[in-house]
Amino acid sequence: MAYGGYDWNRRLGDYISSVADALNSQNGGQLSTLISVSRGSYCNVVAAGLDQNKGQDVNRLSRQLEKVAPLGEMLGQHMRCMQYFVNRRFVDSYNALEKSANAFLQEFRNWESAWAMKALHTVAYELRTIAEMADKEMASNGKIPDKLKGAGSFLMKVFGALAGKGPKRVGALYVTCQLFKIYFKLGTVHLCRSVIRSIETARVFDFEEFPIRDRVTYMYYTGRLEVFNDQFVLADQKLMYALVHCDPLKKNNIRMVLKYLIPVKLSLGVMPSKLLLERYGLLEYKEVIQALRTGDIRLLRQALQTNEDQFLRSGVYLVLEKLELQCYRRLMRKIHIIQKQKDPGRAHQVKMDCVLKALKWLNIEMDIDEVECIMAILIYRNYIKGYFSHKSKVVVLSKQDPFPALTAMT
Amino acid sequence: MAGVGDEYDSRRNFYPDPGNAWDGQPYDPVSQQQPNWYSYYPPQQLDDRGQAGQEGIAVPPLPAMPPPQAPLPPGLTTTPTWSVSDQGVANGGNNTTYTGHSSYSHLPQQGQEYTGYGTSEIQQAVNYAHPQTANGSQPYAQGYAGYNYMPDQNAYNHQGYNNNCFQKHGTESYTQNVGAPYAPPNQYQLTDATLYASTSNYYDLNGYQSAGSRGEGGQGQASWSDPKQGQYSYTSYAVQNVDTNAAYGTAKLNPEDNVQFAPDYSQQWADYYASLNAVPQTDTESTVALQAASSAPAAPTPAPSYASVVAAPAAQQPPPPGTAAHHYSWQAAAASYAVSQSSQDSTIAEASGAGTPWNANANLTSQTHWNPSSNQTSQSDHFNQSQFPPLDKHPRTPVNQHHQQSQVTHNLQQQQQSKSPKLHIVTNPRITATIGSLGSGKETHKPAYISVPAKKSSSSVSTDAVADATLQAESFPSSLRTYVERALSRCKDESQKATCQEIMKDMITRASKDGTLFTRDWDTEPLFQLPAPSSSSVKKETVQHNNSTKSEWSPARRLKTRWEPPATVNSDDKPGRVHGFHNSFREGGHDLSKEDSTQSHSKWEKREDLWIKSTIAGNEHLKNMSKRGLKRLRKGILSQGGENGSSDSEEEHAHGVHLGSLSTADTPEEKERRQNRFKRFDRGKDSGRGGKGSGRGERGPAAGSASARRATALQLALNSGDGQNGRAVEDIDWDSLTIRGTCQEVEKRYLRLTSAPDPNTVRPEDVLKRALEMVKSTTKSYLFRCEQFKSIRQDLTVQRIRNEFTVQVYETHARMALEAGDLPEYNQCQTQLKSLYGDGIKGCSNEFAAYSLLYILFNRGNSRDLLSAMAKLTEEGRKDEVVKHALEVRHAVAIGNYTTFFRLYRTAPVLSPCLMDSHAEKMRFEAVKFMTRSYRPTIPVASVARVLGFIIEPNSEGENEELEECEEWLRAHGAYLQFDSTISELVMEAKKLLIL
């Protein structure tokens, strides 16, 4: 036991020395690895060491901690955070981490260069990750989880330390992305706006200079925000950026982007290939796309109903729902084509009876007023070129390009 | 992994956390203690301690005493204003004393006082009343009573004032009473003039019950705890008024009105009296008390004799001369208040009409009314001093008498000076007759009499007295003073007290002999064995003491924050403040100050003494009152239910005195005061713990401690901001902080709380149920109902009632708000309902889920909110008709399908149409935009009207009208309409709308 205790003490000493080395050599990568909690190998070593130490050799430890001079306090807290983490006391772990991060951030501010950027990013990542775990723990204990929120406000501080001019700015986007993750998780997406403004309005730093990883993540989240705002064109741009720049090997990331990009593209009139859906496992859109292709309103409604939960959660339900108008358009187009085949001379006049019949065939109960209304909307939105005659209950289609391409409309 | 955790935990038991070595913070004992610290002294106390820490300050350092006590701006020194305001201080102190006596510093307690008056209070009054005194002043008693009975619009005014208090300050309004002494002059003016106006607009004369709802708490308590509730009903109702009210009433009575209303009043009084009779054996006593009370104010008229008599009883009272007299006069004051109150109430009950501005006479009455009390204050002060016999070089009794004399004389002078020719109105025969009949015989012939020393004592004498007091008090550590206080407050009666004093005398002598007087920690010194009372009762007392200290600070503090510049007591603004106190207590007094130009500078000095004394005295009052409170508590447990709750509030009043007098203390002593405050803190921390432990069984202490604990919790919550005490906040036992309301009033005005709620103003659930029924059935305006709902909601919230009734309240309010189109209010309810349903409490959750959907859809336009609202719908919920409808509406809006929308609008269930209303107009406009863009060449207006929901039922009688309405609407929105002769119908041309 005595020997074992000594052994663990030695290991702790080694760990602290490594941190000191990383600090002295300004090796951000090494420091980052050393202080990683949730995905680092040192975490278990430190935790076990502290568990074994049992506070017996406190003086020795604190003496050792002096080696890492300005970060002694930070490392002390950080080691405790690791210990708590390994022991699955996430709330305590988070609390310790926040103190550690605070100390670290203060030192980081003082450093001229951005050598420790990687370590700071690790801290930001751990803050978010452990805060999520802490929130789960708190929720299961019947307390109101607030750690993730706390992490959010702390990361805003970190962002503030990075967002200015200078070499540190390059790390700001990473923190922004961590903030996005927190805000999306907490459902406080309105808080994203200030961060976005800071990133996008600052002309001192070209967006392309940020690391590609962060840019993709950033574009993914801002694209999602545009979906919420019904800004499909902007959403399309951002999500496409994310898709194009995303590492092609990161299939899951691509899938996440596509999950939002497909509905956006659909509402812009672009259909994905079946292959794409199959490759990225997005089959929930299959029926929707089928319905759009055939003008089968019933199928569209069914597809929406079947996957309602999923669509609601991901937030694309309302986007998909609006595809119904496209579906009506497709139906009209089909009727038009059929009429053209029968009687090309009068094909541009689509009688309401026809439409009603088609809808009835689809088991959709609608009366003439409603169909009139739909026609008015379609014409108003330029889905159909033409006009509606109330008197004769006929949609008179334009003779030239009665169904303009949706992609051209916007 | 869990195993690891367990192992770790077990290890933790053995070893201190290693982290401690590195970072003391999370385990910092200080930071952990902090909650405790605050838990016994809510934040407000910090402020009020200053005023409350009177033990130390009560007696200012001798050398500095005269000048700093009254640093007057030169201009004010000689003005009558000052002298009157000076008196105001005394009055202020008295007032609080009185209120303390009456149980709480705010109106509700009035009720208790009232009942108490019929029971033990009276008993006490009788006990203390000197027979001689009781006999002497019969005519005056009547006169005074009659005077008080005179109803006046002004009286109502003050009701109005109270309303305003309540309206503006909510639960804190009792603050107004307690804290009144600190209020700057303009406070009352404000409330009176401006606020009242608005209130009276809102509530008509008959509506003042709700206005007086502050009082309802107390009234409720009284009737509640009293088995004879029915009989008391009227009484308690009448008692709603605030004590200040009563004071005001007294001050502003108008003789003419009196004549006019006397008969009415007598009827009321008879009612009241009848109710008193219901309590066996109390009527006689009460009448006596009444007389005693009335004798006090009446005294000035027969000044000489009156003066001569007082000295006698004071001196004759055997053991502590001061106390007896004190009690007596106090009692009298209280009783007279009761009288004035009841009169006031009856006045209001009669909704007395024409208001005449009160006159000097009235003012005088109020003053005289109070003066005996101020005597008492000073006496008690002396009594306090007499507790330190060893160092008392002066014979005790003489000092007391000196003191008393000087003060009384002083008062007398004032009275004489301010005596107005109208004073004889007091003996208005009609009223006298009324009273006589009311007094029903024998008791009436036992006139109360307050004697006042006839000879004028010189101001130097009184200064001496003060000096003595100063000397004495100074020579003891304040902890000793509190110790003595503690010890004495255990005493049940005079003999016991005397014994106690003897014991303590020995103790102190011994202590001073062996030099431990200043070194000993008196705060922790155990109390000696008391012959009769058990140790538990002592404990109870301490608890109570602390509780009351806590709970009553907030008002004063709030007062300050609301009305005054930051709490620092500037010597410069002291006159103003003093004036304010006076003013706040009795406007009449203020008026008097203007009229009474005869007062001279020399008197001022005397008054200053008086003032000092009263300052000193507050301390003693506190003690006396806590003792009395304890007594009453014990009694209450035994028999009188009505007594029960009053004890702690009485204490609060005791503290009110404290505050009142202390706030007048001088700036030079600020430092000392702070020290004392600190000391008290330490002490309070210890005893406060006891308070926390006290059960809810005894309502008095529990109520106090509950609010204190709540304050603690709030403080903790505040502290949690820095993250250090985060855990402590989580660990707060909110259940133990929950209060139980005692207010029985069905109606209550809403006021946003700014401090811990006061149980006396919070209605319990059963009352709230009645309140809900009332609001449901009332035909009053939405504003009224909304306010009532808000107050119900507040009461539910502060009592943490979350059950189906809560849901019912919120649902009802939400529906009502929807009907009235009050969407913000609706949204508040909706938010609460969401959380209530989330807790699994049953209600119309589906209906409100539907409303919520529609609300988000139409009012927020945030697709994310809408999505989450939809995601929350349960499978079962989706089948609900209202939800289904809401979802369909949502779909129609998403697509822009106006036809469907207006169909759904027409068929909307329950209150959905209320929510759709806001969007209908928008939808119509969109629709017309669509139509004019799509239709060619024209659309018949009839068709538009049908589709856009103008025509509710085709081919019905009203169709033409509806068509016209549609036509009008279309024209108003820029449509081109023309008559199509081919179909002989009005059509809308498919042109771009004029306004686009």
Image (cartoon, rainbow, N blue to C red):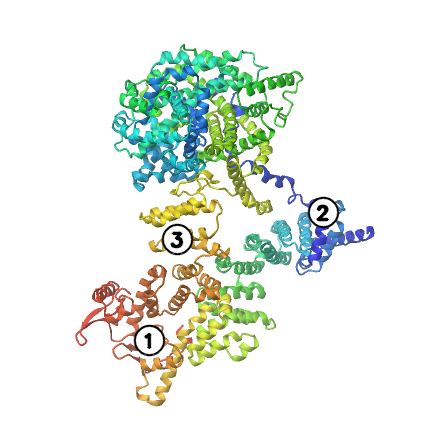
Where does the N terminus of chain B fall, quadrant-wise?
A: bottom right
3D distance between C-alphas at marks 1 and 3: 38 Å
Mark 2 neighbour class, 10 Å CA radius: few under 14, some 14 to 19, many 20 or more:
few
Q: Are marks 2 and 1 on the same chain?
A: no
Q: Which mark is residue B730?
A: none
Instruction: Tell me the amino acid under the disc marked 3.
Output: Thr
Is any part of residue A158 visible from this angle?
Answer: no
| The label number, if any, that marks residue B812 in the structure image | 3
Given the current orientation, which residue lies at the most extreme front position? B280
Residue furthest out toward the top = B455
Q: From the viewer's perspective, is B471 left or right of B273?
A: right
The image position of residue B347, as x and y in percent, is 31, 31
Q: Is residue A62 left or right of residue B66?
A: right
**Observer-nearest of B934 and B720:** B720
Please report whichever mark, 3 or 2, sits nearer to the chain's N-terminal start: 2
Q: Residue at x 46, y 35 (%)?
A: B555
| Up/down of A352 relative to A313, above or below | below
Tell whether A15 sits left or right of B33.
right
The chain to which mark 2 is attached is B
Which quarter of the figure is the C terminus of chain B placed in?
A: bottom left
Q: Which mark is residue B13?
A: 2
Query: Which numbered marker is on residue A367?
Result: 1
